[in-house]
Amino acid sequence: MAETPSTMLAIGTVAPHFNLADTEGEQVSLDDFKDAPALLVAFICNHCPYVKHVRSKFAEVARDYQARGVAVVGISSNDAESYSDDSPEAMAEEVKLAGYTFPYLYDETQEVAKAYQAACTPDFFLFDRDRRLVYRGQFDDSRPGNGRPVTGKDLTAAVDAVLKGKPVASQQRPSVGCNIKWKRGNAPDYFARSHRSSS
């Protein structure tokens, strides 16, 4: 299957604002998490095999860190008109199936994905207490079919460092997965550039 990598947004970037509806129809905003010691934003979806590969472990990791005060948010930016498996209704069902305890938000306009320069699912962005980006990249080095265990070790090492007030390792590997399913004519310039360079 074709892989799309993270864009690797610049470390130190301030968390872009979002205000999106969750699967219960409630609006969830970046400002809702202002007191959290860290914020993890994960661009995910329902049907992507890369997300399915890590979802159980990711749900577990999210629960563990939420218990320690970390804010976790999942965002789906896929074109639900072309990919009905990623519709808001299907997202509500996925929350139950996957055991997600975090808000799962729908980015209908895809503007939030663009603000984060999200490119693939899953794509992880970790911000410190000041909401500056300290980690972006892979959950771990497991991929569908490569036989490596799903541990979340890369992401959890970064979150642990933030919670301990220590610097996050500068060596960070991009996440890879299915590309975000952009609406016709809505693909951002960074997506077009990455596809030209990989073709």
Image (cartoon, rainbow, N blue to C red):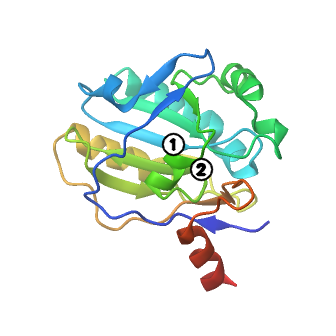
Q: Quadrant of residue 17?
A: top left
> How many other residues sit within 10 Å of disc 1, few (<14), some (14-19) or many (≥20)?
many
Q: Is residue 122 above or below residue 63?
A: below
Question: Do the CB atoms of the residues marked 1 and 2 lie less than 8 Å apart?
Answer: yes
Q: Is residue 175 above or below residue 71?
A: below
| Secondary structure found at label 1 | strand
Residue 164 position within the rendered picture, expressed as x and y whole percent measured from the top left: 19, 39
Q: Quadrant of the N terminus?
A: bottom right
Frontmost residue, 56 versus 112: 112
Residue 180 position within the rendered picture, expressed as x and y whole percent measured from the top left: 66, 55
The kind of residue on which mark 1 rests is Ala
Q: Mark on residue 122? A: 2
Q: Quadrant of residue 13?
A: bottom left
- Which is nearer the N-term, disc 1 or disc 2? 1
| Secondary structure found at label 2 | loop
Residue 2 position within the rendered picture, expressed as x and y whole percent measured from the top left: 75, 68
Residue 6 position within the rendered picture, expressed as x and y whole percent measured from the top left: 52, 63
Q: Which residue is mark 1?
A: 42
